[in-house]
Amino acid sequence: MFAHDEVRFHPDADGSVLTASVGLFTVAGLVLLLACGNLGKLLPVRGIARGPELAVRRALGAGRVRVMRLLLLEALLLSGVGAAGAAAFLPARRAAKVDPVEVLRNA
């Protein structure tokens, strides 16, 4: 295969591809920063809003462990749904790793 420094874009496109890549990564980073900020503000509000529900559960006899298990199970379920959504991107990642030279040779 090619060494990393031997694979080049068209000479006229080298600079523009680098500029576009830096711009794209900057925008992606800003979107990620906004998402983290939103999550950081929403989680405490969600906890405060669930306070009465948890108080009723405790008043009806649920122990601390049971309430903690409920919250942990809910968090794990949400994480699992998020992980399943991320798994949908694995085929796209695999397709991005395809060597264009090999594809063109076999076409």
Image (cartoon, grey):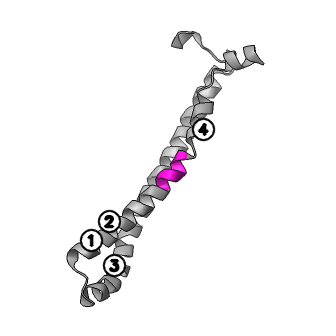
Counting from the top left corner in percent of width and height, residue 73 is at: 36, 66
Is 10 left, or right, of 32 in this rendering? right
Q: CA distance from mark 2 to mark 4?
A: 30 Å
Which residue position holds label 1?
A: 68
Q: Residue at x 34, y 74 (%)?
A: 47
- Using the rendered image of the protein, determine whether residue 10 is visible from the camera's viewpoint: no
* Mark 1 crowd level (few <14, some 14–19, many ≥20, 10 Å Cα): few
Q: CA distance from mark 4 to mark 3?
A: 40 Å
Q: Secondary structure at mark 4?
A: helix
Q: Residue at x 55, y 39 (%)?
A: 90
Which residue position holds label 3?
A: 48
Q: Secondary structure at mark 3?
A: helix
Answer above or below: position of 107 versus 69: above
Q: Main secondary structure of the magenta part?
A: helix
Disc with the residue nearer the chain's start (4 vs 3): 3
Q: CA distance from mark 1 to mark 2?
A: 6 Å
Viewer-nearest of labels 3 and 2?
2
Answer above or below: position of 23 versus 80: above
Counting from the top left corner in percent of width and height, residue 59 is at: 25, 90
Is 5 left, or right, of 65 in this rendering? right
Residues marked 1 and 2 touching at CB (< 8 Å): yes
Quarter residue 23 falls in: top right
Mark drawn on residue 72: 2
Closer to the camera in the image, 101 or 61: 61
Which residue position holds label 4?
A: 91
Q: Amino acid at mark 1?
A: Met
Quarter that holds the C terminus: top right
Residues marked 2 and 4 touching at CB (< 8 Å): no
Question: Which range of residues does the magenta coloring cover?
Answer: 82-87
Q: Secondary structure at mark 2?
A: helix
Answer above or below: position of 8 versus 76: above
